[in-house]
Image (cartoon, coloured by chain):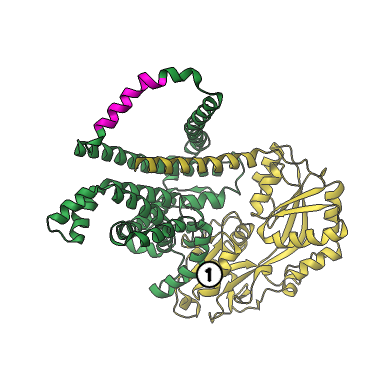
Chain colours: A yellow, B green
Amino acid sequence: MSTLIRRLTLAALLASLLVVTTGCRSTTDAAPVPGTGRVIENKGSDTLVNLALAWAERYQDVRPDISIAVTGGGSGTGIAALINGTVDLAGASRAIKAEELDAAHANGIDPVEFVVARDAIAVVVHPDNPIDHLTLQQVSDIYSGKFNNWQELGGEDRPIVRLSRETNSGTHVYFLEAVVRLGRSDDRTLFSTDTLLLPSSEGIGAEVRQNPNTIGYEGLGYVADYMKTIAIGLTDDGPFWQPSVETVNEGHYPIARDLYIYTAGQPTGEVKAYLDWIMQAEAQAIVLELGFVPIQE
Amino acid sequence: MTDRPRIAQERQATPPSGAQPRRPRRSLAETLIERAIQTTGISAIVLVVMIFLFLIREGIPAFVEIPLQDLLAARWYPIEAYYGLVPLIAGSLIITLGAAIIALPLGVATAIFIAEIIPEWAREILKPLVEVLAGIPSVVIGFMGMIVIAPFFRTALNIPTGLTAFTGMVLLAWMALPTVVSVVEDVLDTVPRTYRDAGLALGMTRWQMIAKIVLPAGKSGILTALMLGVGRAIGETMTVMMVTGNAPRIPTSPLDIFHPVRTMTATIAAEMGEVARGSTHYHVLFAVGLTLFVITFLVNLAAASVVFRSSKRSERMLS
C-alpha cells in the first residue's frame, strides 16, 4: 500500500520535474541571431498565423533556400518573443503597446512596424438566431452585461451566452477597445464576468455551431459556414454593413483594423527580402484568398 | 502471523555472519548502481525544493507589488491590472470538490465490484481496462468534453451553455477514477482473508461482510485514494481549460456549478505565454502557481499522514 503511494508520488515528482526542467530550458535557450540564419522565425498573432503560413509556403517556391518557421500563440506572445530576441518577425493584430516598447528598448531592441494586411472582426451568432443586425452600441451593451436575454434586442426568449477569445489574443484587446469601449480611450468598461474566455478560434466555432444562445466574434478570415454574421451599424437607423472585403476596403464596416509584422530594428538581408515580397501583389493575393483585406498600395 | 517473528530473527541473525566478509568483494558495478540510485533519490528531493524556491522567488514580488486587498478582490482581468485571485481559487476548489464528490462513490463502488464481487478471470480483464482509462491524454478528454459532453449537458439540463463547472467536474471525476479505483482495490486486497471468513462464519451476507468489515478495515486507504484523486483533479489543466468556459466569476450559490468558472491552472496555461518576463502579471501568475503548489502539497501531506497512521494501526491490530 504505502509502496504504491510512494511509487505514485515518485512518478508524479519525476513527471513534474521533467515538465519544469524542459520548460525552463526553452525560455532560457539562446535564439539564433535575427537575420543571419537561413531560417526566419515568425511568431505571434493567431489571427495572422494562417496567413503567415500561406505566405511562408508560397515563399518556398520563390526562394527554396529560405525556410520560414511560423508559430502562433497570440500577438502578446509574438511581441514578447521579439523583445526576448527569439524571433525575427512578430505578427500582431494590434499595434505594439507603450510598455512593450519600453521593455524592448530596455532589452536593446527597437521594434519596427509594418502593416501587412487588414482585417475585420465579424460578430457571429448561431444561424437559427433571428437577429441579423445590431448597432455597435448594442454589441457593446451585450458584452458589458447590460443585455442578458435576446428578447431585449427583439430576438427569441433565450439567455445570451457571450463568447470571447482569451485575454492574450490581439483580437480580444481590439474588440475591447473598438467595440466594448466604442473606441473611447477614457472608457473603462470591461467584459461582463460571465463572458466565456475560450483559448482558441476553434473553441468559439465549436460553441457557436451547436448553441443558439451564443454571440461571439471572429476575424473575418475565420468565419465558417455554420456561423451567421451580424450586420453592424453606428446608429439605430442604420445603415448596417455586413463584414466583407468590399465594405472593409471602402471603409464602411466599423470593426476593421490593420495587421502588423514587427521586426527587431530595420530589417536587413533575407528578412527584408521576405517583407518586401509580402507587400507585393503575389503575396497580397493570398491575403484576399484567406478572407483578409489586402493593403491598399 | 506466526511467521513474522521468525523472519525478523533470521534477518537480524544474517548480517553479522554473512555481510561482513562479503563487503571487500563488492564489485565496482554494484557500487556504481548504488550511487546512481542514491543520486536520483536525493536529486528528486533537491529538485522539489528548488522548484519551490523558484516559485517563491518569482511569486513573492506579486505580494509586494500589489496590495493585499487587490489580490483579494473579486475581479480577474490582468491586462487592465485587476488581479483579484478569489474567482480563480474559488473556481479550482469548486471543481475539485465536485470531482471528488462524484469520483469517490463511483470509484469505491467500482473497486468493490472488481475486488470482491466478480470472479478472478473477469477481474483480470476489468482491472487493466480501468488502468487504460488513466492513459487517455487530458486534451483528448477535453476535446470530447467540448464537442460531445458540453452540448449534451446544455440540452439535457436546459442551461444557457454546456461549458460549465459541472462539465469540468464530471470530466475530472472521470479522469480521477482510475487512481481512486486502483488505490481502493489495492487496499481491499490487503484486508486479510481471515476477516472475511470470520464475518461469513458469523452468518453475514456478502453485502454485510463488505459494508461492515471490508470497507471499515480499508477506510484509511479509501481516504488516501480520495486525496490522490483530489491531487490529480486540482492540477489538471487542459481539460478544464477546454470545458469550463474560463469566465472568472465567483460562484455564490450551489446552482452556480451550472455556470462557467475559471481555474488557477487554466489561467496560468492561458496567460503565461503572453506575459513579459518580470512584469507584475508574470509575478502574479507565479503567485497563482505558488498557491496551487501549497494546496497540492497540503493535500499530499494529508494523504501521507493518513497512510502512516493506518500502518501504525494495522501493526497494533496484528500484534
- Chain for disc number 1: A
SS class, disc 1: helix
Please state which of residues B253 and B163 is positioned toward the viewer in this rendering: B163
In the displayed structure, does residue B38 sit left or right of residue A272?
left
**B190 shown above or below B246:** above
Question: In this orientation, which residue lies closer to the viewer: B242 or A127?
Answer: B242
Please give the name of the residue rendered at 38% of the width and 40% of the height, measured from the top-left corner.
Answer: A3
Extent of the magenta region = B5-19
Residue projecting furthest to the left: B202
Which residue does the numbered mark 1 point to in the structure image?
A207
x, y percentage for residue B79? 56, 50
Whether residue B77 is visible here, answered yes or no, is no
Residue A195 percent location from the top left of the image: 49, 62
**Residue B249: x %, y % from top left:** 43, 57
* Mark 1 residue type: Glu
**A6 or A245: which is nearer to us?**
A6
The quadrant in which residue A23 appears is: top right
Q: Is residue B128 left or right of residue A241?
A: left
Residue neighbourhood size for the residue with mark 1, other residues' Cα within 10 Å, grouped as few (<14), some (14–19), many (≥20): many
Q: Main secondary structure of the magenta part?
A: helix
Image quadrant containing the N terminus of chain A = top left
Q: Is residue B18 magenta?
A: yes
Q: Residue at x 38, y 43 (%)?
A: A5
Residue beneath the point at 86% across and 56% down = A64
